[in-house]
Structures are given as C-alpha cells and as structure tokens.
Amino acid sequence: MPDNTYQANQKRDFKDASYGQLARIGKALSSPKRLELLDLLCQSDRTVEALASETRMSVANTSQHLQALQTARLVETTKNGRYVVYRLADALVSDFFRRFRLLAENRLAEIEQIRRRFFSEDEEVSPVDRRTLLERVQQKRAIVIDVRPQNEYRTAHIAGALPIPLEQLKQRLSELPRTKEVVAYCRGPFCVLAKEAVEVLRSHGFRASRLEDSVHDWRARGLPVAVGEPPVHRRLTRAH
Amino acid sequence: MPDNTYQANQKRDFKDASYGQLARIGKALSSPKRLELLDLLCQSDRTVEALASETRMSVANTSQHLQALQTARLVETTKNGRYVVYRLADALVSDFFRRFRLLAENRLAEIEQIRRRFFSEDEEVSPVDRRTLLERVQQKRAIVIDVRPQNEYRTAHIAGALPIPLEQLKQRLSELPRTKEVVAYCRGPFCVLAKEAVEVLRSHGFRASRLEDSVHDWRARGLPVAVGEPPVHRRLTRAH
DNA sequence: AGCATATTCAAGCACTTAATTGAATAATTG
DNA sequence: CAATTATTCAATTAAGTGCTTGAATATGCT
C-alpha cells in the first residue's frame, strides 16, 4: 500500500512536471503584447528598441516581455554592439504561431468581427481572387508589392514581389503600372501597412487591393517564397 | 494632425483587440491543469467528475478550469441528465494541441529529461522500430494493444489494435500471444497507462514495449486509424 | 415530495503578473 | 574619460489567477 502510494505519487509528479513544461509555452502566449512581439519576430530579427517603438510599449516593458519569451525558449538573442537582437529560436516557432493564429480565427468569431470593423470589404483580395493571383501575375495582369520595411522583405518575401516600403510609396508611384491590378501585402492579417498602401494607391487612381496573407501563409500554401534582394532585371522591366 | 492621431489610435485599437483575442487562446493554454484536461478531452468526451478524478483535482476546481477552456471556445458542453459532458469544440483543437506539444518538446529540453527520468529506456519502442511496426504487425510478429478505457478506444484507435483496458489486463493475459512482441499504447507521451501495462506484461514473461504515440500522432503520420468496436473476427483469431 | 448526486456559483486567500519608474550596467562615441 | 545610448534590473502598484470552501442549482431516483 505505501509502495502503491509512492508509485501513484510518482505518476502524478511526472504528469505535473510534464504539463508544467507545456504551460511554460502557454504562459508565453497568454499576453497580447507578447503575441504581438512574436508576430513581429516572425517577420525578421529586431532590436529591443525597434520592437518597443513598433508595439508602442516602453523599452523596459518590451524587454521584460522578450525575456518571458526567451524563458519559454521561443526566441533567442545575440548581442551586437550596444544592441541586443532578438530572433525566433527556430523556424518551427513561426510555423506554430501561424497555426495558433489559425486556431484562434477558427474558434473565435470575434476576430472576424474585429477585422470586418477595421477593413472595408472592397479593399480586400477575395479568397477566389487569391487562388488565381499567381496566374494573373504571370499573365502580367497583376503585380504584387511588399510594403514592409526592407529588411523584412530581405528575410523572406513572396517570390516576384516588388519591395516598396510604405514609407517610400508616395515617392515611388511612378514605378507602378496603372494598367495592372496592384496587390499589396505586409505582415499578415493583423498588420495595417497594406491597408494604408491600398488607401494611398487608390487615392492616386490605381486599382489596388490588400492581400492579408503573410509570407509564411504563402509558403504554407506551397507557393514560391524568395529571400534577399529582388532580381535586378525585374526592377528594370517592372519600373515604367 | 488630430486626424492622423485618430487613425493611429484606430490602428492601435485594432491590433490590441486582435492580439487580445489571440491571447484568449494563450491564456487557456497557460495552466498545467487546463492542459491536462485538454489532453484528456483529445481522447474522448468526459464528464466533469471523470475529469476531476483523472486529474486529481476537486470537482469545483475542475469545473472552473473547464469553463476557462470553454470561454476560449476550445471545448463545449452538452447536458446529459445530471451530467455535463465536455468535449473538444472542433477536431482542429486536437490537431493543434498535438502541434503545441511538439513545439514544447522541440524547444524545452526539460521535457525530454523528465521523460527519461520516468521511463526506462528499454521499455520504449525505439524510433526505428516504430517505423516498421505496421509491417511487423502484418507479418504477425507483433500485436498492438490499446490499454486505455474502452470508450476512448471506441472514439478512435490505431487500426488493428486490440482493446485491453489496463484494468482488465491481468485477467486477460491468456488472450495475448507469448510468441509475438506486444506493443502497448495509450493516450500519448504524458500518459502512464502503457508503462504500467508493459510492467505487468514483462513480469508475466511477455516481450512487451511501450509506444508513446497517441492515436492522433498515428493519424498525423498518415497511418490507419479506426473508430468503434474491434472487428469480431479479429478478436476471435487474436484470442488464444 | 424528499433525498442523493452532479455541477456551478460566490467569496476569500495566497500568489502571480503587467506595467511603471528610476537606477544600474554595458558598449560606443566624441 | 566623460557623455550618450541600448538594455536590463529592482522595487512598486494594481489587477488578475488558482485553489479552497461552503452554499446554491438542477436533475434523477425512490
């Protein structure tokens, strides 16, 4: 009997320890701010300062949240001079984050409501158009632009997309064709860059719409993803 | 300028609201006990009482945790007489839970340490043997037994596995072949049923080992999964 | 109807967490 | 070497969480 209890306790301890470890990951994912940081880190490495200003948090608070993510081993750091660069600890994390988001979108109808309240329906690329997008690009009837900051583009982008950071968009409108459909994408469904880009483009008479996919969604669909600078001939032919 | 601020605030509100929703899921996953409940619910529907006794929690506490899972819409309930039956809200949840666990196993070396401390190496089916298991079963050199409670077996089980709940194992040893390798599996890596089964079997002279896969892992590998009672002819031929 | 059982609710307690603030550390620059 | 900049640390506060306890609700049984 005491031996039975001992074994039963061992089993309980094993379970508690195991699920306790799983909960370390869960805890890391339990704060909106940490999730926002993680989503940004899925796009590219970043310094604490850059993450703080992007998320509108104080540097100290950002640092604390990043340490929480590091404790869960979802991110890691390297020191570069005065800067500490945070990055995902493994590509698996960005893959997981995507599934986490998809689960939330599937289970929580509120997310779709929030989205509908913020985005107007006519600026989105419809699911139908999304499937034929690659085709339309190949037929030169559409062009995809990546409006994220350049280093995120370099980390990974939709193959064939033209890098035009939102900041530069107004000055570079002449590079874009008025005859084609212009599809802008950014970090994913919770990023507002592409929405702003579409507003700018439409106000200048372009036919523009927003693709809510991130480059990770694109990859997960088995569609081509590229790394680094855009091929030079592309820029020359695309520019008008 | 005031209009800019207004728009900037709208964007911030959109992000805060969106990531706030994601965090609802994260919060549900941030407690060891809730994760244990969720893992159990991946195996089959259960009443509050059943979940409480399985996890060694008070009924009230179990009920509270289940409500937290329900708030995150990961589980749902139906009332059956006096009982409230909790179940996963969608098959996507069990698929997600598996990936969550795999991420944790990948990122947190502590999990492997805890496992090694609890399981002895020689009772596990090695990764190599796992890949050829199906083959050995077909060649009638091995037999797979499912030692979970019967209703979990009925919900889903490895195709061809023989249902022998751990509770009945000692009385039903005569049904098992002494010439074949006996492979026991249960709910997955954090479940102790198969370990106990292997100990019982070995102490009675069987060649037995534990397969740490759950039926969901099996399905995710593209291997055959079945539902319901075992085919009758199987039981007759298998029984000795 | 009265009792037993399954579950939920509500209050209370110890403990944890998120965010702020100001100081400390560490690397770089003039 | 002093000043500057990026980050972390430590202390504080308010809010939130996990678990317990005892009561309340709801269903079924005799």
Image (tube, coloured by chain):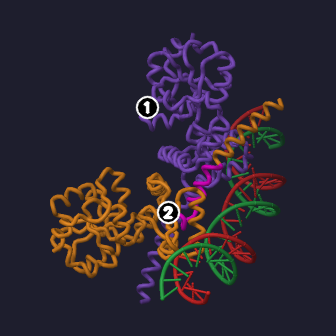
Chain colours: A purple, B orange, C red, D green
Counting the numbered discs, the total is: 2
Question: Magenta region: which residues?
Answer: B20-34
Name the residue tied to disc 1: A223
Position of the C terminus of chain B by quadrant? bottom left
Position of the N terminus of chain B by quadrant? top right
On the question of residue B225 being in view, the answer is yes
Residue lying at the far top of the rendered structure: A240
Q: Position of residue B239 (x, y in %)?
A: 18, 72
Residue B221, relative to residue A227: is it above or below?
below
Residue lying at 35% horizontally and 61% vertically, measured from the top left: B156
What is the three-letter code of the residue carrying label 1?
Leu
Q: Nearer the viewer, mark 1 or mark 2?
A: 2
Dot 2: element: helix
Q: Is residue A215 magenta?
A: no
Q: Position of residue A4 (x, y in %)?
A: 41, 85
Residue A89 vs residue B165: left or right?
right
Name the residue tied to disc 2: B38
On the question of residue A89 being in view, the answer is no
Residue D30 vs residue A149: left or right?
left
Binning the other alpha carbons within 10 Å of mark 2 as few (below 14), some (14 to 19) or many (20 upward) gives many
Q: Chain of mark 2?
A: B
Q: Is residue B24 magenta?
A: yes
Q: Position of residue A199 (x, y in %)?
A: 67, 25
Given residues A60 and B190, the one toward you in this image is B190
